[in-house]
Amino acid sequence: MLQAHGLACDRGDRRLFSGVDFAVPAGEWLQVEGPNGAGKTSLLRIVAGLAAAAEGHLEWEGRPVAEARDEFHARLLYLGHAPAIKDDLSALENLQIAAAVAGRPLDEATALAALRRIGLGGREDLPSRVLSQGQKRRVALARLLCSQARLWILDEPFVALDVAAVDQLCTILDEHLARGGLLLFTSHQAVHLAGSGGNLRLGR
Amino acid sequence: MKAFVAIVRRDLLLAARRKSEVLTALFFFMIVVSLFPLGIGPETAMLRRIAPGVLWVAALLAAMLSLNRLFATDHQDGTLEQMALSPTPLAVLVSGKVLAHWLTSGLPLVLLAPVLGLQFDLSARALGVLMISLLLGTPILSLIGAIGAALTLGVRGGGVLLSLLVLPLYIPALIFGAGAVEADVAGLGAGGHLSLLGALLALGVFFAPWAATAALRIALD
């Protein structure tokens, strides 16, 4: 259960949003919507702990996140606008190193299986700089397949993906929700996910 | 600990894939040091006197060259965000990056210095002291440089600002490092200078990753 109480965010002198409350129970999703510049990314960064909220606080499993930051991070997977892919490393190396930094090292077989499932079979050992934008995105999404994190925070996960990959990502998200995972994401398109969830509109 | 090893391995792997960046700094060091004997002429007494200072100043400048990329690429491609969200404290991962920076840009200078020192007619003993002083001193350069690189992250024209910020902070390392070789050549013994250099290193190892981490958190916010 993730709860937010009265979150507010300032950018310079301007208040982007204030009084944002939401609760995401286990197995449910929350889609953050709003026009460009409404503060969707800022909200996700605040929830992930990358930025500080001007007001308000977060609770994870009933405890304030600020009290147990490392524990919260151990349960969190965040995918931002930048895919966190090193151009000089191969897809396989990128995936394994990202997992090790996140504190859950991956063996090669698991990593290869994930890359194959996400549609990068045969391209595991190519340097990422020769991959297309969408394929780089897929390398980042392969982290979802290997992740045991309970809370996924995804910023525009559907950008640069083709139709087949969008369907596949929806399946991956459904599986995560079915396992009792929580999902917080932004998207400009309507997304059809199984299970229950809600929408949060910013910038009214 | 595993995350620390992963970061060190990743940065070494990246350096191996982009050899030009490491080699540029190394060649810069070699050429700058070699220009002095050519410019001053073969007067051995004079060369011996300026050798420690020249080698140390060249090492400072060479270590500066790769600093502005220390965190910039990680910041651009989003890796820095992932490091900040790791259950491993960011300061530990930053230490890993500093260690990798020293292994690729500091250690080669230490190994190359005795060869370059021969051009200045330094004795074998003085070359040994020079190596020890660089061995203790170059990690300080990487550690202080990491604070500067973190503070100037995302700033326009950060490269020049970084040198203005970091070079004055290198002065103590320069004084004790070059001083150690000079003292040894003068027959005074290098022990005092080297212990002070070691103390600076110990201080840096404890405080620099912490300070750099604080600066990185501000850059990320």
Image (cartoon, coloured by chain):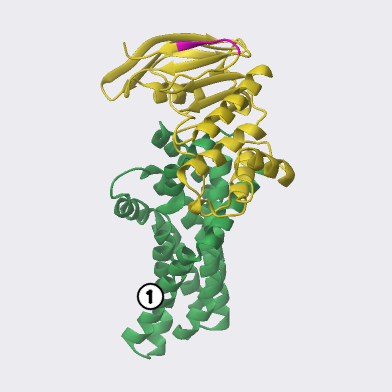
Chain B, colour shown: green
In the figure, the shade used to draw chain A is yellow
Question: What secondary structure is the magenta-colored segment mainly?
Answer: strand
Quadrant of the image containing the N terminus of chain A: top right
Residue B1 is situated, as x and y percent measured from the top left of the image, at 67, 42
User: Percent x, y for residue B198?
Assistant: 56, 57
Between residue B45 and residue A33, name the one nearer to us: A33
Residue A43 visible within the image? yes
Residue A197 included in the magenta stretch of the image: yes
User: What residue type is disc 1 on?
Assistant: Val
Q: Which chain does the numbered disc 1 sit on? A: B
Where residue A113 appears, as percent x and y from the top left, is 70, 41
Left or right: B64 as drawn, with respect to A94: left
Magenta segment, which residues?
Answer: A195-199
Residue under circle 1? B32
Report the residue at 54% width, 54% height from top: B201
In the figure, residue A177 lies in which quadrant? top right
Please report the residue visible at 49 percent of the width from the left and 45 percent of the height from the top.
B208
Residue at the spot 34% in from the left edge and 55% down from the top edge: B163
Q: Is residue A137 left or right of residue B53?
A: right
Is residue A127 positioned above or below A95 on the image?
A: below
Q: Is residue A5 above or below residue B220?
A: above
Residue toward you, B75 or B130: B75
Q: Residues within 10 Å of mark 1 (few under 14, many from 20)?
A: some
